[in-house]
Amino acid sequence: MKKLFTILLFLLQLLVFSQADMHINNVEAFFMSDSSATVNIYPFKDSKQHEIVTIKKTEPYDYVLVLIKKSEGGWFQIKNISYAPLAVDSTISKFNGAWLYDPKLYINLVGSDSVPLYTKPVKNATCINVPQQKVQVLKTRQGWAMVKCTINGKTQQGWVYRKNQCAFPWTICNWN
């Protein structure tokens, strides 16, 4: 009985850690507009058919939070999508697993004073430090986000590590 309990406990821990790891390998971003906006949501990548969804803002601080499962050639697969900070319309969650094409998804860069922007999605790649700012997500890879940012008036692209990403527009999420 003790051996069975130990095996079950081990399997449960494996499940918990694999679930946590699944979230770590995704990028969370936000979609935000000044008023209501429409978003085309596709059932699968490269689909011609899509559903037009109107993002309804009831308060000026409302936004849509998207957990990106993966990205390929301008396409972003939705792992989870929801309204924030309050659930305005729960029907948006039916699009979990669907795709967005070239959406305007954003994250805030966070760090102590500046944020490293890497040339490749690995920590030993060359990097430059950039100021904290709101940036557009261009693609993702295993928790890294390729972003477009502005440095001294010039547009720059690079990779941002997960701990320097914040998916909430109204805070800097500084958990370093």
Image (tube, helix red, strand yellow):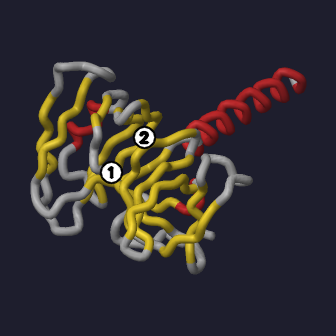
Residue 126 spot, x, y in % from top left: 67, 57
User: In front: 167, or 6?
Assistant: 167
Looking at the image, is 24 positioned above or below residue 12?
Answer: below
Q: Quadrant of residue 2?
A: top right
User: In front: 105, or 146?
Assistant: 146
Total residue callouts:
2
**Residue drawn at 56 percent across, 45 percent down:** 143
1 or 2: tag closer to the N-terminus: 2
* Residue density around tag 2, few if under 14, some if 14–19, many if 20 or more, within 10 Å: many
Residue at the far bottom: name it: 113
Residue at the far right: name it: 3
**Residue drawn at 61 percent across, 42 percent down:** 20
The amino acid type, in three-letter code, at marker 2 is: Ile
Q: Which mark is residue 73?
A: none
Left or right of residue 10: residue 58: left
Residue 69 spot, x, y in % from top left: 46, 35
User: In front: 119, or 87?
Assistant: 119
The secondary structure type at the circle numbered 1 is loop
Residue that mark 2 sits on: 68
Q: Quadrant of residue 40?
A: top left
The secondary structure type at the circle numbered 2 is strand
Q: Quadrant of residue 90?
A: top left
**Residue drawn at 17 percent across, 68 percent down:** 60
Residue 115 spot, x, y in % from top left: 56, 69
Quarter holding the C terminus?
bottom right
Residue that mark 1 sits on: 105
* Residue density around tag 1, few if under 14, some if 14–19, many if 20 or more, within 10 Å: many
Residue at the far front: name it: 154
- The answer for how far apart the CA atoms under marks 1 and 2 are is 10 Å
Left or right of residue 15: residue 143: left
